[in-house]
Amino acid sequence: MRILVNERGAARLLSRHLWVFRRDVLSGPDAPGLYPVYWGKRFLALALYNPQSDLAMRAYRFRPAEDPVKALLDNLDTALRRRLPHLEGEPEGGFRLAHAEGDFLPGLVVDYYAGHVVVQATAHAWEGLLPQVAERLKPLAKSVLAKNDAKSRELEGLPLYVRPLLGPVPERVAVREGGVRYLVDLLEGQKTGAYLDQRENRILMERFRGERALDVFSYAGGFGLHLALGFQEVISVDSSKDALQRAEENARLNGLNLKTVEANAFDYLRSLERAGERFDLIVLDPPAFAKGKKDVERAYRAYKEVNLRAIKLLKEGGILATASCSHHLTEPLFYEMLREAAQDAHRSLRVLEKRGQGFDHPVLLNHPETHYLKFALLEVL
């Protein structure tokens, strides 16, 4: 059995983009699975396929293979080998072992937390392969948890559930990151338990020293913990009381002082400005304001507003560490937004570093959706 695509679908695959939508599929099997893709008689790719999904086809190999399942799992083995030196160097750390399309494993995320592994599968064809995935993870993992509660699974016709695949899964585990440790709730935490894509950017904060720092959209205090190693006062701001309670617990775990404020970030930044407050360093790590293309204009305004407020609160020589995880807000748009925010704040900003997601969240140039995290380190002059 095979999938036949039209010319537009073929053009996407020939350009090495991994996705083909249902409108560009001419014919295919009735059941989800792994199948070869053709344009007429020309072989194009091997792909995960689900005829019920709008994102019908996700390629994972552009050469034929006698065993499509083995070819897919070989991609997992390759991804694990890339991370192995880091795991051996930091066995108590947190890393992404498999980054979906970035590792030619579309629809599969595998995260490592101090010896415990969390798997999240959002493509139908992975469901029956999870026991084999767990088997390949066994040499690295004390336990493997399937955290398949992402809403996107419903688009694939898949149930939502959380269950162990291997070993006893602890409710929480302590992960070491640079000079701090933080607790990860494997069963109830957001995503797979934590946000690993900012790992290297969080550790970067340990470079700085000063009197006052502000961590906005702090979640469980990730950036704030690292800042507390070098600043006399660190304030973590989030709208979630539960997240701030976790931040406080993480601070106690490290013997660090962290002040938490439950507030709407936009309102709180305005109140600080009215009060004449000033900071040496501010981190902005907001959620994805742009979920789709239609949201970009509104998201641009929101990102600009929050960055404008932060720029006004910084002392001369102060540092703004600011991020966007919205794929649809491209890197050029991100820096254009920052330029406009600096102009409206009547401040001059110097770009110290342009950064992004960590090495364990690889970007495929041919598949732009894999490049989503922008992180700028800026100095107020």
Image (tube, rainbow, N blue to C red):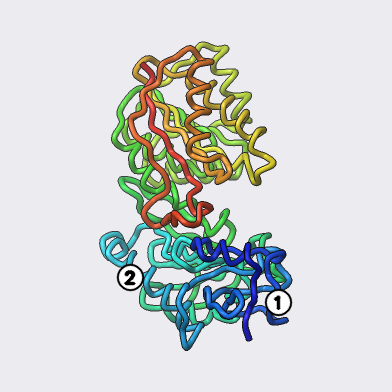
Residue 24: where, in percent of width, then height? Answer: 68, 66
Disc 2 packing (10 Å; few <14; some 14–19; many ≥20): few
Camera-side residue: 131 or 75? 75
Q: Amino acid at mark 2?
A: Arg
202 in relation to 77, above or below: above
Residue 164: where, in percent of width, then height? Answer: 55, 74
Give the image quarter of residue 157: bottom right
Q: Secondary structure at mark 2?
A: helix
Q: Residue at x 40, y 23 (%)?
A: 212
The answer to which of marks 2 and 1 sits earlier in the sequence is: 1
238 in relation to 134, above or below: above
Q: Residue at x 53, y 28 (%)?
A: 337
The quadrant the N terminus occupies is bottom right
Disc 1 packing (10 Å; few <14; some 14–19; many ≥20): few
262 in relation to 340, above or below: below
272 in relation to 124, above or below: above
Q: Name the residue tied to disc 1.
A: 27
- CB atoms of marks 2 and 1 within 8 Å: no
Q: Is residue 79 left or right of residue 110?
A: left
- Tag shown at residue 81: 2
Q: Secondary structure at mark 1?
A: strand
Give the image quarter of residue 355: top left
Q: Is residue 142 left or right of residue 266?
A: left
Q: Is residue 50 left or right of residue 204?
A: right
What's the CA distance linking mark 2 and mark 1? 36 Å
Q: Amino acid at mark 1?
A: Ser
